[in-house]
Image (tube, rainbow, N blue to C red):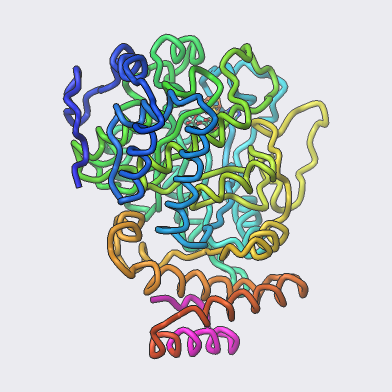
């Protein structure tokens, strides 16, 4: 499989910026989609090949409804063919929202004097994690503003603290981070705390728009942010997540730039990002941008389908920023992870702290505020397998999405059984009665699909052990 087939104007050199706006636009402007070319490109992806920038640009420029349907159908087929029915669940936990930047789209910007500023105390952090565990969460992403208070040591301590919180059968098995970029030393400190994925979004890859949206603060340095994941990799964190905030600039440009970013990491470090996020901008207090580049629902679902086809072995994360109906459509295109039971207000997972009601507590509005159990229930109804699996990280199997994609039988042997085991744990410990009934039926249906009898027996035996009280069993 050829990773990065293009010759770029700015060659890929580790720790060096690589985005040339004109080059990205050239790819887009030169792309001339036809029925045949779109079909051929989709076919290439279905044959488990990564797409080049030029090929992705063709999909991005397709406007004819039949071509768009070919793209969406292709993404649905790829999902069914490769990934099966698992959806990994996680929850975001805002640890602190002090911030010295002034991102025009964010309710936590420094100039917003009506935002409640808070950093969870150690006690509050523990209480929030306990509350999340009581709902059945096993995977968290800790989120921080960009502020001197949130040093690498501070973040590493928070991560260690979260791993230590155990409530009954509850524990957090994977702690991811979404925080401002560090230097290599800082990333090493965070790495030592055994974080899962380090995630940072470029927001927009378009230089002029970036400068406009980030008028002051450390985040105003485009290149420092662009090369953040290079520094993370140099520090030994090879599990990283990229993202763009859709609505700041032309969505086609952003998708192509995300792919350019993937190519850069693959070229320099031989490993692409673990995940791509594509948050769509939501209303926020003191929001300060026009809606010129807003992405409508059809464009949004299409861009996810194109991402799926373009980087078939990268995890795609969809968040609670999106309403239920969009979530449902996008899941069918191969999103691998969603958050559930999300609360963005600081400290809101445990008791709501008493605060001045005139102050806002959330960074932006979310559109899906269902509980974890409600989301799990709907996933089960739709025949997805909700999963809290963390087996690959614990077994030292890195490049999990790549293995799922490229190692024959990997999903059958590891992913599906592990997803079923974590679902069995969830049902036993946390599910409502109704969800539990449906959940056990789903597990049974999936067990019956297993063709290797001796393996099936091993899975059944582990499920029995879970019913007897054992936890954290995986292959
Ligand atoms: N402060 C760090 C940073 O900016 O990278 C990390 C936390 S920030 C709270 C996480 C992400 O939230 C940002 O990268 C941005 O993409 C997203 N975000 C900010 N404002 C938003 C809005 N109004 N709607 C949707 N997402 C938003
Ligand atoms: Fe601060 Fe992040 Fe919000 Fe920007 S997006 S104002 S850096 S919290």
Residue 308 found in image quarter? top left
Q: Compared to 131, does 145 lie above or below? A: above
Residue at image point 66% right, 30% down: 364
Residue at image point 72% right, 70% down: 435
Furthest-right residue in view?
A: 357
Residue at image point 42% right, 48% down: 315
Residue 468 lies in the magenta-colored region:
yes
Residue 337: % across, % down = 51, 52
Residue at image point 53% right, 71% down: 422
| Observer able to see residue 230 | no
Q: Compared to 10, does 186 lie above or below? A: below
167 left or right of 227 in image: right
Point out the stretch of residues depicted in magenta: 458-475
Residue 426 found in image quarter? bottom right
328 left or right of 188 in image: right
Q: Quadrant of ligand 1?
A: top right
Residue 56 lies in the magenta-colored region:
no
Residue 425: % across, % down = 58, 75
Along the line of sight, which residue is nearer the eye, 68 or 300?
68
Q: Compared to 257, does 26 lie above or below? A: above
361 left or right of 99 in image: right
| Observer able to see residue 474 | yes
Residue 131 found in image quarter? bottom right
Along the line of sight, which residue is nearer the eye, 232 or 95?
232
Residue 396: % across, % down = 29, 65
Q: Quadrant of the C terminus?
A: bottom left
Residue 4: % across, % down = 21, 35
153 left or right of 444 in image: left
């Amino acid at each position: 499989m050829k990773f990065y087939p293009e010759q770029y104007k700015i060659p890929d050199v580790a720790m060096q910026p690589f985005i040339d706006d004109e080059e990205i636009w050239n790819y887009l402007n030169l792309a001339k989609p036809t029925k045949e070319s779109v079909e051929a490109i989709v076919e290439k992806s279905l044959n488990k090949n990564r797409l080049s920038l030029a090929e992705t640009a063709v999909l991005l420029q397709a406007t004819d409804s039949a071509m768009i349907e070919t793209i969406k159908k292709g993404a649905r087929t790829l999902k069914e063919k490769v990934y099966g029915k698992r959806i990994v669940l996680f929850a975001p936990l805002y640890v602190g929202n002090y911030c010295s930047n002034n991102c025009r789209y964010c309710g936590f910007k420094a100039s917003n004097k009506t935002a409640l500023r808070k950093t969870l105390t150690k006690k509050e952090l523990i209480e929030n994690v306990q509350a999340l565990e009581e709902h059945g969460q096993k995977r968290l992403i800790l989120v921080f503003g960009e502020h001197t208070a949130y040093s690498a040591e501070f973040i590493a301590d928070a991560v260690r603290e979260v791993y230590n919180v155990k409530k009954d059968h509850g524990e957090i098995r994977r702690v991811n981070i979404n925080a401002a970029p560090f230097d290599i030393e800082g990333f090493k400190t965070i790495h030592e705390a055994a974080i899962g994925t380090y995630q940072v979004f470029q927001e927009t890859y378009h230089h002029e728009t970036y400068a406009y949206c980030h008028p002051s603060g450390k985040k105003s340095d485009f290149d420092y942010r662009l090369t953040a994941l290079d520094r993370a990799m140099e520090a030994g964190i090879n599990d990283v997540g990229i993202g763009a905030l859709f609505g700041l600039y032309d969505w086609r440009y952003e998708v192509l730039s995300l792919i350019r970013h993937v190519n850069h990491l693959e070229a320099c470090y031989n490993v692409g990002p673990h995940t791509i996020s594509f948050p769509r901008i939501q209303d926020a207090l003191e929001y300060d941008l026009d809606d010129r580049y807003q992405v409508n629902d059809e464009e949004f679902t299409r861009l996810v389908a194109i991402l799926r086809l373009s980087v078939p072995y990268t995890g795609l994360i969809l968040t609670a920023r999106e309403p239920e109906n969009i979530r449902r459509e996008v899941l069918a295109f191969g999103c691998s992870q969603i958050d559930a039971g999300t609360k963005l207000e600081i400290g809101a997972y445990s008791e709501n702290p008493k605060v001045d009601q005139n102050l806002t507590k959330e960074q932006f509005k979310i559109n899906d505020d269902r509980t974890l159990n409600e989301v799990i229930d709907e996933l089960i109804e739709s025949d997805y397998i909700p999963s809290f699996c963390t087996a690959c990280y614990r077994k030292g199997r890195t490049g999990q999405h790549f293995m799922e994609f490229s190692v024959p039988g990997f999903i059958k042997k590891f992913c599906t059984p592990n997803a079923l085991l974590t679902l069995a744990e969830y049902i036993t410990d946390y599910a409502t009665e109704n969800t539990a009934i449906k959940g056990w039926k789903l597990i049974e249906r999936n067990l019956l699909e297993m063709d290797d009898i001796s393996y099936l027996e091993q899975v059944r035996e582990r499920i029995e052990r879970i019913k007897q009280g054992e936890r954290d069993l995986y292959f």
